[in-house]
Image (spheres, rainbow, N blue to C red):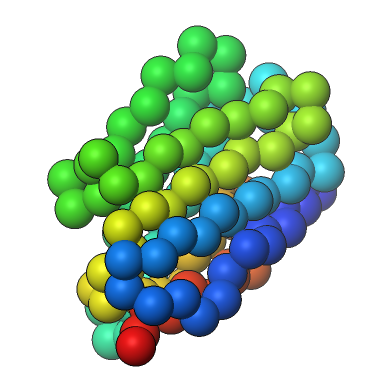
């Protein structure tokens, strides 16, 4: 069973930055993508950003383009999400995902609160 452990969430003021990390318990190269999703209170979970584990191709939600950057370290089996210029609407629980054909794993989430 693959385990994903997120860290780095917290309370930050609007305009601030946070860096999220997600460590996998196995090599991520056996999977196609690793990424971040978020869920705000009362809303559905939505894609934030993904990266392919081998080619490093990235994909971002329109709402975070230019502010968030996803990266991965295959050797450390870790994916990162650098979040800059944070807005109150970025508030939510951020979940790490590791996926490939027929396989889909999720972390337990880390809470990000953007508030003054």
Q: Residue at x 27, y 77 (%)?
A: 88
Q: Let me know if residue 115 appears in the view.
A: yes
Quadrant of the rendering where the C terminus is positioned: bottom left
Picture quadrant where residue 40 is located: bottom left
In screen coordinates, is 87 left or right of 20?
left
Query: Residue furthest toward the top?
Result: 55
Residue 55 coordinates in the image, percent (x, y): 50, 11
Q: Is residue 53 above or below residue 68?
A: above
Which residue is at a point 49% across and 18% down the rendered structure image? 56
Pick out the residue farthest to the left. 62
Count of all numbered marks drawn on residues in the image? 0
Q: Give the image location of residue 109, x and y in percent.
A: 58, 68
Q: Is residue 9 above or below residue 46?
A: below
Is 29 drawn above or below residue 33 in the view shown? Answer: above
Could one spot residue 98 in this view of the protein?
Answer: no
Q: Residue at x 31, y 58 (%)?
A: 85
Residue drawn at x 31%, y 66% is 15
Q: Quadrant of residue 74?
A: top right
Locate residue 52, reporting x and y percent. 49, 23
Whole-percent x and y of residue 115? 35, 85
Q: Looking at the image, is 97 positioned above or below residue 99?
A: below
Residue 27 placement, left or right of 84: right
């Amino acid at each position: 069973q693959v385990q994903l452990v997120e860290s780095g969430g917290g309370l930050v003021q609007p305009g601030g930055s946070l860096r999220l990390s997600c460590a996998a318990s196995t090599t991520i190269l056996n999977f196609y993508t690793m990424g971040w999703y978020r869920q705000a209170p009362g809303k559905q979970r939505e894609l934030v950003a993904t990266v392919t584990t081998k080619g490093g191709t990235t994909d971002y939600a329109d709402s975070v383009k230019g502010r968030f950057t996803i990266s991965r370290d295959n050797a450390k089996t870790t994916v990162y999400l650098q979040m800059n210029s944070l807005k109150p609407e970025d508030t939510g629980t951020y979940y790490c995902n590791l996926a490939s054909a027929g396989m889909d794993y999720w972390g337990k989430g880390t809470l990000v609160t953007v508030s003054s």
